[in-house]
Image (cartoon, grey):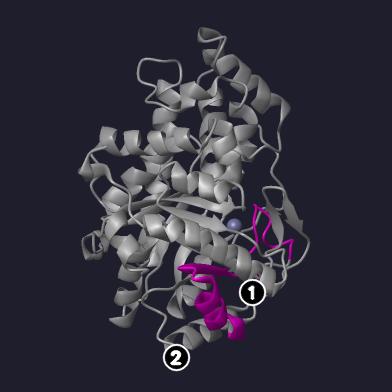
């Protein structure tokens, strides 16, 4: 691995956003979920256009989909190399558990989340501390979570939100050693944020109080607040999916001005997954509609994908219809293959959306503000 394509801890990246905020320009870094190569390329391209640092994250499901975190890590570095991406990027495990987080540390992720929010506070702190003790000596950053978000994340389902207690935030950072913390404040996972009460229950004051406590304890330049379940779910993308044969109902996201309110009072990392899934699905559906019969040109790749789309009208997760083909096809540049054209469209779609989001998050132009500390240098900061 050449130095040019090294991955960074989230800490220096999120600190650049915090310093921007302290200088009067509130900012948060976009953290985008990835499942396949062109999705990664699209994210990187959007970041490049906005001159923004960024976080690429893979869930346990994404790791499983691609055959392991080692495969994802190689895929991301390959995407960076193929696009000559020199802006700072972290590769983060989203919603990790006790088993997966250490594996991802070993496999070259530069950041991991340990979601122990189902445990009681002391259990949560103890497990988060255990992961920090494993990750920090390698310079790998750790994100924890308190409270519970409504919606489905991996194998965990919560019907309603349980807010994180802002008064526990400085204590949690201190006791667990975590670098970042997702504090549930009423956002929710998935494409139906309105129906889960996400909007009516949005409590930005939870973030404001959490952040003020961190400032009071002098934690805010090394510890950061994270917003999960923050996709905006653009109506025009949902409409496009439905126009081209899909059936996605009741979709609603978090309005951008609400996200910006949260950034203003202390959010420094914003997770975006659903928006990209929707964009990918709209692109596939439109592609098959615009190119009737194209699936017959590649009966072992395009045809099974189209079949899945035709039979899963509610699908928004690209893994639902891409898992029918060999995952290795989705891990490298599809140039010269049946996927080249549609994946080119997917990549551009994602790039445009990511570029717009990072401008809205206030982190465009911050790439040069990130202190490029290597993981081994970062490791020393914990001693
Ligand atoms: Zn989440």
Mark 2 Cα within 10 Å, few/some/many (few <14, many 20+)? few
Q: Is mark 2 within 8 Å of ligand 1?
A: no
Q: Please give left or right for residue 160 compared with residue 109 in the image.
A: right
Q: Is residue 33 visible?
A: no
- On-image quarter of the C terminus: bottom left
- Ligand 1 in which quarter: bottom right
Quickly name the residue at label 1: 202
Where 112 falls versus 267 (above or below)? above
Q: Please give left or right for residue 205 compared with residue 328 in the image.
A: right
Q: Position of residue 207 (x, y in %)?
A: 54, 79
Q: Position of residue 296 (x, y in %)?
A: 56, 9
Where 275 falls versus 310 (above or below)? below
* Residue range highlighted in magenta: 167-196
Q: Secondary structure at mark 2?
A: helix
Quarter residue 51 falls in: bottom left
Label at residue 216: 2
Mark 1 Cα within 10 Å, few/some/many (few <14, many 20+)? some
């Amino acid at each position: 691995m050449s130095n040019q394509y090294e991955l960074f801890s989230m800490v220096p990246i999120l600190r650049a956003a915090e310093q921007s905020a302290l200088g009067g320009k509130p900012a948060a870094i976009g953290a985008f979920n990835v499942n396949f190569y062109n999705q990664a390329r699209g994210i990187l391209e959007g970041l490049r256009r906005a001159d923004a640092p960024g976080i690429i994250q893979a869930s346990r499901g994404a790791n499983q989909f691609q055959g392991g975190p080692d495969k994802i890590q190689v895929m991301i570095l390959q995407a960076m190399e193929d696009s000559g991406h020199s802006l700072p990027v972290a590769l983060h495990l989203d919603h990790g558990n006790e088993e997966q987080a250490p594996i991802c540390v070993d496999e070259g992720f530069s950041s991991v989340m340990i979601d122990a929010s189902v445990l009681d506070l002391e259990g949560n702190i103890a497990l988060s501390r255990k992961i920090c003790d494993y990750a920090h000596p390698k310079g790998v950053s750790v994100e924890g979570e308190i409270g519970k978000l409504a919606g489905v994340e991996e194998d965990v389902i919560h019907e309603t939100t349980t807010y994180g207690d802002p008064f526990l935030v400085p204590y949690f950072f201190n006791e667990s050693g975590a670098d970042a913390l997702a504090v549930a404040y009423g956002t929710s996972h998935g494409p139906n944020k309105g129906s889960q009460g996400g909007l009516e229950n949005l409590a930005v004051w939870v973030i404001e109080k959490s952040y003020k406590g961190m400032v009071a304890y002098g934690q805010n330049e090394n510890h950061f607040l994270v917003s999960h379940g923050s996709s905006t779910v653009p109506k025009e993308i949902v409409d496009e999916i439905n126009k081209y044969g899909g059936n996605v109902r009741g979709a609603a996201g978090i309005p951008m001005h609400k996200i910006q309110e949260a950034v203003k009072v202390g959010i420094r990392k914003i997770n975006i997954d659903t928006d990209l899934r929707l964009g990918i699905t709209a692109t596939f559906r439109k592609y098959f509609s615009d190119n009737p019969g194209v699936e017959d040109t590649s009966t072992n790749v395009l045809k099974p994908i189209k079949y899945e789309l035709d039979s899963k009208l509610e699908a928004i997760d690209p893994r639902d219809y891409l898992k029918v083909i060999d995952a290795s096809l989705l891990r490298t540049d599809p140039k010269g293959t049946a996927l080249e054209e549609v994946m080119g469209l997917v990549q551009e779609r994602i790039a445009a959306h990511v570029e717009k989001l990072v401008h809205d998050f206030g982190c465009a132009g911050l790439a040069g503000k990130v202190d490029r500390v290597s993981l081994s240098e970062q490791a020393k900061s914990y001693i």
